Amino acid sequence: MVSVLTEWTCGGHVGFILDRKRFTTRAPWRILHCRSPDLLFTRVSTPALSRGSLSSHTMFFLPPSDFLKTELYEMSWNLRDGLRDSLVAAAPYGGPIALLREPHRRSPSSRPQLEIYSASGVDIASFPWKSGPVVQLGWTVSDELLCIQEDGSVLIYDLFGSFKRHFTMGQEVVQTQVLEAKVFHSPYGTGVAIVTGSSRFTLATNIDDLKLRRLPEVPGLQGKPSCWVVLTQDRQTKVLLSNGPELYILDNTSCTAVCPPGFSPQVGNIVQMAVSFSYKYLALFTDTGHLWTGSSHLQDKLSEVDTKKTPTPKHMVWCRRPKSQQPSVVLMWDRLLLVAGVCGDTIQFPLEDPCVLVGELDGVRIISSTNQELLQEVPLVCQDMFKIASMAPGALLLEAHREYEKSSQKADEYLREIKEQSMLGEAVRQCVEAAGHEYDPSTQKSLLRAASFGKCFLTDFSPDQFVTTCRELRVLNGVRENGVGLPLTHTQFKQMTLQVLIDRLVYRQFYPLAIEMCRYLKIPDYQGVSRVLKHWASCKVQQKDLSDDAIARVVCVKVGDSPGVSYSHIAAKAYECGRTELAIKLLDSEARSGEQVPLLLKMKRSQLALSKAVESGDTDLVYTVVSYLKNEMNRGDFFMTLRNQPVALSLYRQFCKLQEQETLKDLYNQDDDHQELANYYVTASYREKRLDSRLSLLQSAIDEYNKAKNEFSAKMTEDEMRLLRFQRKLDDEKGAGLLGLSLQATMEALLSLGLHKQTEQLYRDFRVPDKRYWWLKLMSLAEKEEWEELEKFSKSKKSPIGYLAFVDVCMKSNNKYEAKKYVSKVTPEQKVKAHLAVSDLEGAADAAIERKNDAEMGAILSRCSASDRLLIDRLNRARAAAAKK
């Protein structure tokens, strides 16, 4: 990025030294911006330029297309043979680099070496390649390495070289072999496309949901095509290929010949093609050196440039920033890098070593054996601010701050100039935005200090953008460090999102940096720190050099009670690694039993799972464990396990009472619980329809009650058996349908049928209380309106329920005549109630006055009407007389 000026001219053919490398261009170059030795920006006026007074300054030159090449890293790797004879794949967004040396070497004694590095060249993993010949390497969106072999097998490794899984591109590929392969990214995920020896294309648009698509044949194609790319358009994945001068598009069902607009047949055969990062633009290079650019839909042409280079370029990628109206294409040969813009201009960069081009969202990474650079179109805000004699508000504010630090009065002049245009807010915004695009921390600070300086003179300026940019730049500078190796631009960071960046740091095991980043940006724990700790713990349990106790202790101390971290998840990882005891120790720290129990069952620790479920107090969880144990154990071991857990046993009994009656019987037999077993027989007897079976079950219940020394229950069960036999006898003789009724219901049924003798027999045999028997007979006779029988019954002996009941029952049947017969038999205490029941106010008054009961006389008065004046006076005199005494 910093270039020392040794010679410069303006106009005509320009030759100059930039970054110690010679570049040439046919178009005039212009100075975009310059810096003084203290790395602060210096605004240079046109007169100063014409006088050649800039020889003491560090200069920045950009060609008319405004491209800038920034050195990202001096690579930390030590590649003895450079990148020659190697397959190289670099993931976008500053991702890792995979390198397979001499991929076609097949000697068992000397195997190819697969190496994985960070973007800065720091070694991550390295191992000898022991599988088949590799055709292509590529990275997924989640930084997993894809190794595509000649036989169509695709092997997937994680960032640290651990094998994860594999899949195949079809059985027919084993015979025909893979000639070429490409890894691409679409809205569906990461995909793989291959062309086989039979000249057929096969696609998998998403390797995580593998669905292979074999595309139609291409007419006249023998072997592999001259060149081809994968296009993603309108949620469809297609292949664009060239076969000599012909161009075809393959989709699911057809092969269609196409011709790009404005593409002349005289330009020759297409030998190289490239699609932009967003799949929006397409570039075609011919064997005559012509470069055609246009939309990937092949409906619009952008430009056609004669590069004067007939050899086929080794790499060709697009270089553009989002929303740019002037995208460019970067082509690379052995010793030359050429940038061709849609305006027809080209820029040439000589190369010393073989390089690899990696297309990015807003530029191109150039990776060589010694360093890595980023070629990108300069953002518009930087162009506006740093061009010679720029009068942009941001440029003026930057110069004002520089003069202010020198204690110069010119600072006030520049500020006045900005304020007069009412552009101070815009100046601050430009400085903040430009700082975000700068890669050098010193330049970032200068711009942000200028923005902070300008903010001091604004009263209603929102600081949100300034604060956010400061925080984001601190994050970006941290991850750009050589040890981390994520050279993200601000544009890439915004596209990637902060959460994805944190996930990548976690995936690469930069846990302290990820945690500090979360805390610095004040991300909620469940989204930030907790997720980092969760991943850290999951990796920690896989360490084989530490004991279970040591790992459990370290994890519990580090994780603690962090919200959002589940110890069960960590324990599951430990179990997957074969460390069952460690998993159990970690589960002891899990606060939620619902998370503990399923994993314990999975680990075959059923008794411990049952204990945890019981301790939780969650009945559903206990039922879950009991159900699992029942299916996994034999019946004897199952019952013995439940005996050691009384709570679980009780819940299982409740379940069996509703669902599994026979199992309940076995449980009682296992425990010698005679009382409950007898209760079970009694309950079971009610489900039997045949009398013999019911009596047999009741007899078994009597035997169990006797064993349990429950004489009362045994006697009651015997009475039940006697009642059943009695009911069966009457059913046979009278057809009464009494079987199964209770004693009281049986007596009511007999009375309703007029079988008084049989009712009296039950009354005597079962020692029915007198009051119950009299009530039953009283209600039955009144209901049948057998008043004579009722009168006889009342005279049979003294009523144990009194005679007021007879009065009430008769009145309920609306028979006042019969009710009056029993009023005289009512006891003195109930005389008033009886007379009132039959509406005999005079009789009630006589009884109340005789008893001198004020409450009863008051009750009678409340029933009197205006026509009962004599009775009212009589009662009032009686109440007064009683009150005097």
Image (tube, rainbow, N blue to C red):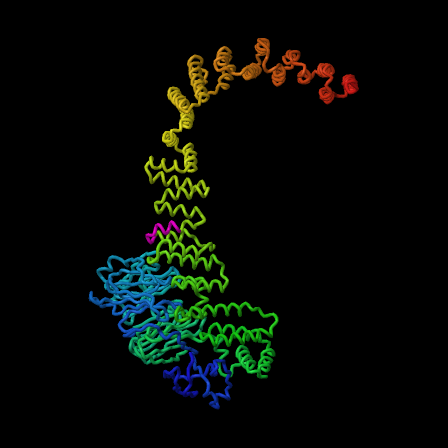
Using the image, determine if residue 576 lies above or below residue 347: above
> Picture quarter containing residue 273?
bottom left
Point out residue 304 in the picture as x, y percentages from the top left corner: 37, 76
Most distant residue in the bottom direction: 51
Indicate yes or no whether the magenta region holds residue 574. no
Using the image, determine if residue 555 lies above or below residue 717: below
Indicate yes or no whether the magenta region holds residue 579. yes
Point out residue 727 in the picture as x, y percentages from the top left corner: 44, 16
Q: Nearer the viewer, residue 743 or 781?
A: 743
Using the image, determine if residue 247 lies above or below residue 307: above
Q: Residue at x 46, y 16 (%)?
A: 736
- Point out the stretch of residues depicted in magenta: 576-585
Q: Nearer the viewer, residue 83 or 511?
A: 511
On-image quarter of the N terminus: bottom left
On-image quarter of the C terminus: top right
In-image side of 837 versus 223 (left or right): right
In-image side of 154 versus 464 (left or right): left
Instruction: Look at the magenta stretch and give its main secondary structure.
Output: helix
Using the image, determine if residue 735 lies above or below residue 243: above
Q: Nearer the viewer, residue 517 or 211?
A: 517
Point out residue 62 in the picture as x, y percentages from the top left corner: 43, 81
